[in-house]
Amino acid sequence: MEWSLIAALAGLALVDSTSVGTLVIPLWMLLEPRPRTSRLLLYLSTVAAFYFVAGVLLTVFAGTVRDAVADLSVLSWVQLGLGVALLVLSFVVDPGKRRRRRGSVTPADRWRARLSTAEGSPRAMIGLGVTAAGIEVMSMLPYLGAIGLLTTSDLSLPIWLPALAAYVLIMVLPALVLLAVRVALGDRVQEPLQMVSAWLARHSEGVLGWVLGIAGFLLARDAAFKLGLFGV
C-alpha cells in the first residue's frame, strides 16, 4: 500500500473521529462524576464494530461495481470530479449560519436525551452505539470517501481488510485516549473536557464545510496521482 493512500485514509479517519457518535457522546460519558469505563468501552466497541461491518459490505459492493467497469481510469475521473465538487461545495455550505428558533431542540439535546436513557443497561448502551453509527454512517463523507479510496486502489482482501480495521480504530482512538487521561488524572481534567465538550456541541452542525473541504481535497489528490496529472 502506498504511503499517499495511507496518509489519505489516516486523515479521513481523524476527521471522522470528531463526529457526535465517535467523540461527543463519549465526552459526555467522561464528564460524569464517576465515569463507567466498561459502559464507554462497550459503546465504542459497538460503534467500531458497526462501522467495520458496514465498511466491509460497502467495499465488497463497490468492488463489484469496479470489476464491472472495463476502464478503471473512469472511476478515477469520477473520484476526481467528486473530490473537486466537494471542495467547491465546502466554500458554499455553512450550516452554522442557519438561525434556530428560540427554544428549539438541537441535535445535541436529542443525543443527550438518548444517552441519559441508555446508560441504565449494557443492552441499551449497545443500542445507542448502533443508533449513533447507523444514523451517521451514510452522512459521514470522509468514511464513504475512504471506502472509495480502498475500492479504486484495487487492493487485495488481505490488504484492504486490515486497512479498514485500522481506519475504524483511528476513528475511536481519540475517545480512547481521553478515557485513559480521565482515568489517570481524574477530576483534574474535568474542566478541560467540559470546555471541549461544550465547543463540539455548539459547533457540531457548523463543521460540515471543513469536513467537505478535507474529504474533497484528499479524494481529488488521490485521483490526480492515479491519473498521473502531477507527472508522477
Image (tube, rainbow, N blue to C red):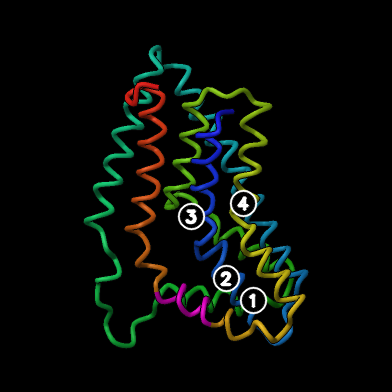
- Spatial separation of the CA atoms under disc 1 and disc 4: 19 Å
Q: What's under tag 2, amino acid-wise?
A: Ile
Which corner quadrant of the image does residue 178 belong to? bottom right
Query: Which contiguous range is marked in magenta?
Result: 195-202
Q: Position of residue 18 (x, y in %)?
A: 51, 62
- Spatial separation of the CA atoms under disc 2 and disc 4: 17 Å
The residue singled out by tag 1 in the image is 29
Sequence order check: which comes first, mark 3 or mark 4? 3
Q: Residue at x 31, y 37 (%)?
A: 82
Which corner quadrant of the image does residue 155 belong to? top right
Closer mark to the observer between disc 3 and disc 1 = 3
Q: What's under tag 3, amino acid-wise?
A: Val
- Spatial separation of the CA atoms under disc 2 and disc 1: 6 Å
Q: Position of residue 106 (x, y in %)?
A: 39, 77
Q: In the image, 150: left or right of 73?
A: right
Closer mark to the observer between disc 2 and disc 4 = 4
Which of 122 and 198 lies nearest the eye of the viewer?
198
Query: What label sits on residue 25 in the rendered view?
Result: 2
Q: What's under tag 1, amino acid-wise?
A: Met
Sequence order check: which comes first, mark 3 or mark 2? 3
The residue singled out by tag 3 in the image is 15
The residue singled out by tag 4 in the image is 170
- Spatial separation of the CA atoms under disc 3 and disc 2: 16 Å
The reply to whether the C-beta atoms of the residues labelled 2 and 4 are less than 8 Å apart is: no
Look at the image and tell me in which quarter the C terminus lies: top left
Q: Residues within 10 Å of mark 3 (few under 14, many from 20)?
A: many
Which corner quadrant of the image does residue 145 belong to? top left
The reply to whether the C-beta atoms of the residues labelled 2 and 1 are less than 8 Å apart is: yes
Sequence order check: which comes first, mark 2 or mark 4? 2
Q: Residue at x 48, y 34 (%)?
A: 149
**In the image, is residue 102 above or below residue 76?**
below
